[in-house]
Amino acid sequence: MERSKKEKVVEELGTKLKALNYMFLTDYSGMSVAQITKLRRELRSVDTEFTVIKNSLMKIASNGTKAETLKDKYDGPNAIVCIYKDPINAARVIAGFLKDIPNLKLKAGFIGDRVITPEEILRLATLPSREVLIGRFLGLLKGQPQRLVHVLSGNLSKLVFVLNAIKAQKEQA
């Protein structure tokens, strides 16, 4: 590759890495072109990109980005998984492929400013999606005021019963 092309690739990759909040690093050695193409297609459906990149270019492009924390993992045949939306869906796709394609290996990743291990990436795959988690949270928020009103109304109704009983006793006496 010519120097000018390398500089352009580094610039584009650096721009992409600066914008990312989520990324996984994988070892793709031993995978066929058909398997890589299928993986790319599946990942694209969850707004994720699978890119094979030279380690030397990756080291240069990752300077000043969150991906710089993974520099010690840039050895061997690497591909980066650039996640633009939900990392849980991307982790699910990769976990599914790990069962079918044992040659695909997770090395590490980052979520926000936190570096994560391959085990943590696989654990992400077992979590419910972002939309489900938001729905559960909103359900909890909606239920709490209703419970508070129920508890408070229960105490008020007990107070009214006690006052009525006292009134009835005084009327009889």
Image (cartoon, helix red, strand yellow):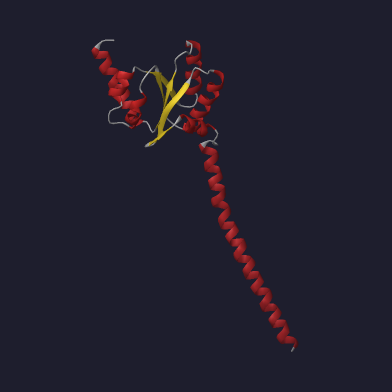
The N terminus - image quarter: top left
Left or right of 63: which side holds 139? right
Where is residue 136 shown, x and y percent of the image?
Answer: 56, 44
Q: Nearer the viewer, residue 126 or 13?
A: 126
Where is residue 133 shown, x and y percent of the image?
Answer: 53, 41
Q: Nearer the viewer, residue 150 or 6?
A: 6
Where is residue 48 shown, x and y percent of the image?
Answer: 45, 25
Q: Nearer the viewer, residue 16 or 67?
A: 67
Residue 94 visible within the image: yes
Residue found 25% across the figure and 18% down from its top: 7
As drawn, which residue projects farthest toward the left?
4
- Would you place residue 161 above or below residue 72 in this image? below
Residue found 53% across the figure and 31% down from its top: 125
Residue 83 visible within the image: no
Number of numbered discs overlaid on the protein picture? 0
Residue found 31% across the figure and 22% down from its top: 12
Residue 115: quarter of image: top left
- Would you place residue 155 above or below residue 168 in this image? above
- Would you place residue 100 above or below residue 140 in this image? above
As drawn, which residue projects farthest toward the right?
172
- Would you place residue 82 above or below residue 143 in this image? above
Residue found 27% across the figure and 18% down from its top: 8
The C terminus - image quarter: bottom right
Left or right of 93: which side holds 108? left
Where is residue 65 shown, x and y percent of the image?
Answer: 31, 31
